[in-house]
Image (cartoon, coloured by chain):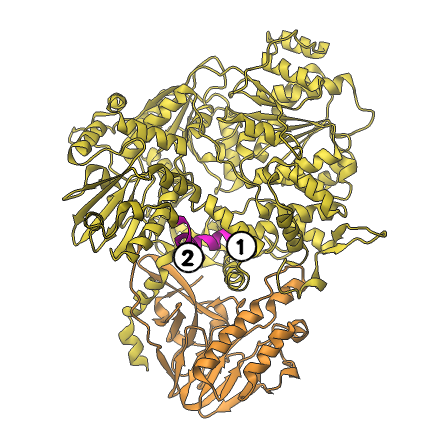
Amino acid sequence: MTAPLPVQAPAALPPAFARWFAARGWRPRAHQLALLDLARAQKSALLIAPTGAGKTLAGFLPSLVDLVENPPPAPALHTLYISPLKALAVDVKRNLEIPLAEMGLDIAIETRTGDTPQNRRLRQRHTPPSILMTTPEQLALLLSYPDAPKFFASLACIVLDELHALANSKRGDLLSLGLARLARLAPAARRVGLSATVAEPEALRRYLMPQPLEGESLAEIVVAPPGALPEISIVATGLPDEEGGEARIPWSGHSARHALPAVYEAIRQNRIVLVFVNTRSQAEFVFQELWRLNDDALPIALHHGSLAAEARRKVEAAMSAGSLRAVVCTSTLDLGIDWGEVDLVVNMGAPKGASRLLQRIGRANHRLDEPSRALLVPANRFEVLECEAARAAALEGAQDGMVAREGALDVLAQHILGCACSQPFDPDGLFAEVCSAAPYRALTRGDFDKLVDFVATGGYALKTYDRFARLRPNAKLEGDMRLRAASPSVVQQYRMNVGTIVEAPMLKVRMIKRGGRRPVGGMGGRYLGEIEEYFIDQLSPGDTFLFAGHILRFEGLAETEALVTKSQSGEPMIPSYYGGKFPLSTYLASRVRRMLAHKAEWVHLPPQVREWLEMQSWRSLLPGEDNLLVECFPRGDKFYLVCYPFEGRLAHQTLGMLLTRRLDRAGARPMGFVASEYSLAIWCLRDPGLMHERHELPLGELFAEDMLGDDLDAWLAESSLLKRTFRDCAIIAGLIERRYPGHEKSGRQVTFSSDLIYNVLREHEPDHILLRATYIDAATGLLDVGRVAAMLKRIKGRIVLKRLDRVSPLAVPVLLDIGKVQVDGEASEALLSEAADKLIEEATRLV
Amino acid sequence: MYEVKDIHLETQPALAVCGVAFDLTPEGAAWWPAERLLVVADLHLEKGSAYAARGIALPPWDTRATLARLENLIARFRPRMVVALGDSFHDASADSRMAPEDAAHLARLMRGRDWIWISGNHDPAPPPQFGGTIVAELDLGPLTFRHEPRPAPATGEIAGHLHPCAAVRVRGRRLRRRCYASDGTRMVLPAFGAYAGGLNVLDRAWDGLFPGLDFHAWMMGGRTVVPVAARRLEGD
């Protein structure tokens, strides 16, 4: 990592600023002045600073100083601030307005988000504020207007907040393309990236800069000193059970119900506590259970992205006012929004990544010199190991590495259409511009041309759509190679579909009176929020579930709404939402493996977990740091193969699918598998351990890297995961509309038709650019193929087989998951015939 | 979790409507062996290009995909007569947008057999360029073939139009498929077109067709057609 800049003579602050700092008894921090110096030298910079280090002020100070020293003659955009959350843009604006008011400075700051009214947006375009705070999607929209060159001509500075959270995603790709465009429209504008600590800051320094054809360009870097070390404790056991015995740490499961009394006790002993969970359903469960324990009636609230906006705003306001004692929340509160005096962060379940944990811990205590306090609550034995590894990493300040990604092709397709909406573009020029965005440096001209063709006519080998083209030659002058949007409706379509966030199809949840069919005149039912359609699909009328803090009874569907009543039942059917959305990070996984392999590191573990590991080393073997332990044992009438790669559930599912195919070919007769974050279990009718010893199926061959070739392709072609990914790519690329002007499509219609389109396209044009984009996405996303590949390489020649007469202690957790996890979608053909088997008699009687 | 299962049910089930036995294919066409007659509904040819004309460039292969599936069935059954139950063409100008090779393919399929185009709401006047007989309804024996089903009783009616699909729950999992719907007195066929969506048979649009929900949905799997009683089905 680059060293912080040497301290030079402090940059002179204008009197208004100097007085303001002095009046508060503050001195500008070294990194704030360093950024000011760099700005005066017209240099772009990345600031890495912990929470509470005055990051936001550091980012804006140079702009404020410049605006005071060189007041613009007429309203013009000076600084563009982009954040990943619109709530953050609003919050930062508020935080900036206070010092401005105190200094008596009159600088126009405005936000522009999806909530900004139409008339204000229009006004902003011809009378811009000096500082505009917005999101990547709104930047894309602004760039698509014909007057974009004029609007951005005066731009002097671009501030990118929480860059670490934005850069490595499709939104980051969209933003990088916007930045490349801004480099043309406002070449003098410098960039400032604000980031939490990351393992490889070079990637972000590169992201900030327009990249040259040869070599690379890096922004300057300023590193603020780290804050005080956090204090992290781990809930090791539950409270004693009713008989007074010691509560056991669960073998499996994700509820952490056993530890909730300890969490409640922590809430009682602190002023304001943030309780982070990994999924919405976990949030509902924890909230419900905490209220069951809440004998003191402490104000404990719930906050997650699916709740109605009004409910969320109420919680946020109460939080700012300091009138809550605890909020149970998902990652919606992960990022930099300042919620005041949080003095403890509780993390329920596994932290999944060292960086994520540090971010969450940073939510407690915004004063740099005091330690943030956190309590980790593992839900099962493996999660105890993960929590210990995460605590050690946090204390060292160690971070997860970023997985390098290439700019997404579907995002580029969207951008190309956006460019055409603004001005006719010359493909040669646009290609050069796109390649200057760091994520698209390796883009080939062939792929770019295919995407332009896709945007124009769909890019199909069957050329029947030329007369419906969305891009047409401009041909204003002789030799004009430029392309333009074919019609105003094309432009309107682009504006309706801009952005890279494709939500899972959601249904509104509405509370009705018991016995009522539907809300009377649309007024009768209270709107509670939105819930994923796939979850509702799993419910039958009468089923109960937790949502918005209530136990609800599902009554049925009415168009796009799920109708519910309040349930009298005390035990809801919990949403079957296992694990989290985030897989265990590679870095944390390697730390867990190391900890398992070195007994000296077990001293921090609770006795129950230590005993469990001792038992494992006595009954079987412990997984080594760099090998792969494979256990084979009989159980019931089947033979089990359990392995421990520690690569996360997604990678294990992919591995399970591929191994099952190979075992099937070798005659092992595999009957099914189940994957957890840490291990994978496959059950067969023949013993794979015996087959290995008889050289019928050497494990080295079973786990050979070539499984990622034909086997992967063959499986992928039929995979429902790929269909889901295709839908998202098709929406982002503009093949399927998010919504029509006027009549909104419900998610369920979109899902159905995108599957049909996928089937037809795969059958007739398997090389189409959108299918390639889908494949790349699935490989890096839902399938985690890169991780499977790295693992297979790591364990090559290092597979350790242990044949056992029965299940090992370490295998128990994953075996307990069998039957609890949903049967995977690929098996639906077999399920359908099962529906018929029961009915075959009825069916024959009919004939 | 994933479970491997063998699929044993491979035989093609038969269904009788007013005593006429039909084979129901997993591709979505019904076969009347006694008359050597193949019935398909709602081909929606050139639906893709209809979207393209509105700026949504869906893959243009839907007509090709639909005709390829139809060709397989024709090769398997060698029908004397094919009845297309209406909405065969997505709109009035579908034939003008059709790729010449697709138009030639359709003409090839029609050659050497009787071909009945029943008119539908999307194609009240199917394009005459392909030949065949264009009628509003066709009576054969005890059966009447028409596009839009009529309220019960409609004894002997074979219709399309509604794009039936059905959803059933098996071991906690919900499966949604295109289906044939029949109570033994009448039958509604699934849409055959590659881009044709589905409408749940419990939707209101079905009210009055099968009073008392006394019918079966013959759900289409990849290789089988599976009958499920209506009272076991779920809505959308």
Residue A78 % position (x, y): 73, 27
Query: What is the magenta range?
Result: A708-726
Q: Quickly name the residue at label 1.
A: A771
Q: Residue at x 48, y 24 (%)?
A: A322
Display colour for chain A: yellow
- For marks 2 and 1, the one nearer the N-term is 2
Amino acid under disc 2: Ala
> Which mark identifies residue A714?
2
Q: Do marks 2 and 1 both belong to one polypeptide chain?
A: yes
Amino acid under disc 1: Leu
**Given the image, what chain letter belongs to the residue carrying mark 1?**
A
Report the front residue among A460 and A196: A460
Display colour for chain B: orange
Q: For residue B105, which quarter of the picture?
A: bottom right
On the rendered structure, is A450 left or right of A284?
right
Single out the mark in the foreground, 2 or 1.
2
